[in-house]
Image (cartoon, rainbow, N blue to C red):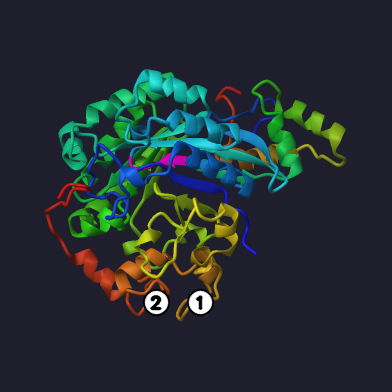
Amino acid sequence: MIAVGARPRMRRGVLLRYDRVRERHVLMYPEGVLVLNDTAADIVAHCDGGATVAEITATLRLRYRGVRDNDVAAVLDRLAGRGMIEVDAHG
Amino acid sequence: MAEPPFGLLAELTHRCPLHCPYCSNPVELVRRADELTTEQWRDTLTQASELGVLQVHLSGGEPLARPDLPEIAAHAADLGCYVNLVTSGLGLTEQRMADLAARGVAHVQLSVQAADAALADRIAGTRAHQHKIAAAAVIKSAGLPLTVNAVLHRANHEQVGPLIELAERLGADRLELANTQYYGWGLVNRSALMPTEDQLAAATPVVRAARERLAGRMEIVYVVADYRDAYPKPCMHGWGARQLTVAPNGDVLPCPAASVLPDLELDNVTRRPLAEIWYESTSFNAFRGTDWMREPCRSCVRRDEDHGGCRCQAYLLTGDAANTDPVCSLSPHHDVVTKALAATSEVFTMRGVS
């Protein structure tokens, strides 16, 4: 699992936007589109390469109730597995 | 009710400086005089965006052959679409690339024909390879992510290893090693393009080792033609399900190869609104869902998974688009595929050259 001190960012060529037609946030990348739920979109929006996983988790706790320690990291793991998010090797 | 489409393949032109014998463009190419105008493309993109399209692939032919490419790309980007340029790289100067990047092109897919320059130029039917190497550098210096795409076939399959090394040298983020799909010119040349069992067996460990070595640096997508699979590919993720193609003349196609289907009445974006074509047209509803299916698809547990395979392949190989894709081992026509795997020829018919 991604480390709590890692600073995730969107990979080059990946864009986040709100789609008015589907009324959902989406990640657009070279080969396709990934439709996000609201919490995942909120997490991705904080992946700027500056904030750590722990900081993003703390931010999400201000907005959503019942965010557990591993929730954010689990979403980031799935997004990293799909090539949307990356962290530096030393992160 | 169908869902809105995610992607639009915009075939801006069929004109191309290359003559690759595997080209997926139809054998009947659209002439320049019949191409949509700049304003018609802008309107098409606006309609596509309103319909739900998020991703626009600017393709061809060679999209750089259109002088209005920057304007078309900018319009797609201004609509909020992800703009992907699919190019041979010929004519992609540093200035043009910088301009396209500034206007919102987000990613470039560059084709290469082989790693060896002489072989690559023979396959392209022109001296193209050196221009591609230069184009890759220009794409990288514009700061855009680069996918290198190489279509594999019998004449270049041994180059899998060298192609991986070439893509690395070019700084590709991603490499697609895609075996030829047998449509358009690819079908014309099938017996000269079909890789041998030995070639395929030799490539597998090379790709596996490179994937391990390059993990996290360069993604490698390796696709083998479905002729050797037990079940067909889930073509287009289903007919009229996720993507549409607009041909250079404005014909709207459920799949890029669909112009071969003789009974399919195609609508044109200059004569009917795109949303109406997507949701209501005969062509987009012809093979939507599962109601059109015959046996063995109709009662098959895989019918929602592979959607009966490819309608164009079913037509091209069995003469009827509503048949099960004959690639499927359950198809009563499967022997046409088995026979095609055995046929060999050494002669290429080059695209657009007779």
Q: Specify whether residue B106 is in view.
A: no
Is B291 left, or right, of B341 in this rendering?
A: right
Q: Position of residue B274 (x, y in %)?
A: 56, 53
Magenta stretch secondary structure, dominant = strand
Is B250 left, or right, of B113 in this rendering?
A: right
Q: Position of residue B298 (x, y in %)?
A: 51, 78
**Highlighted range, magenta:** B57-61
Mark 1 lies on residue: B300
> Which dot marks residue B330?
2
Q: Are marks 2 and 1 on the same chain?
A: yes
Residue at 44% from the left image edge and 57% from the top image edge: B255
Q: Quadrant of the N terminus of chain B?
A: bottom right
Residue at 30% from the left image edge and 32% from the top image edge: B165
Q: Are marks 2 and 1 in contact (CB under 8 Å)?
A: yes
Residue at 28% from the left image edge and 39% from the top image edge: B16
Q: Specify whether residue B338 is in view.
A: yes
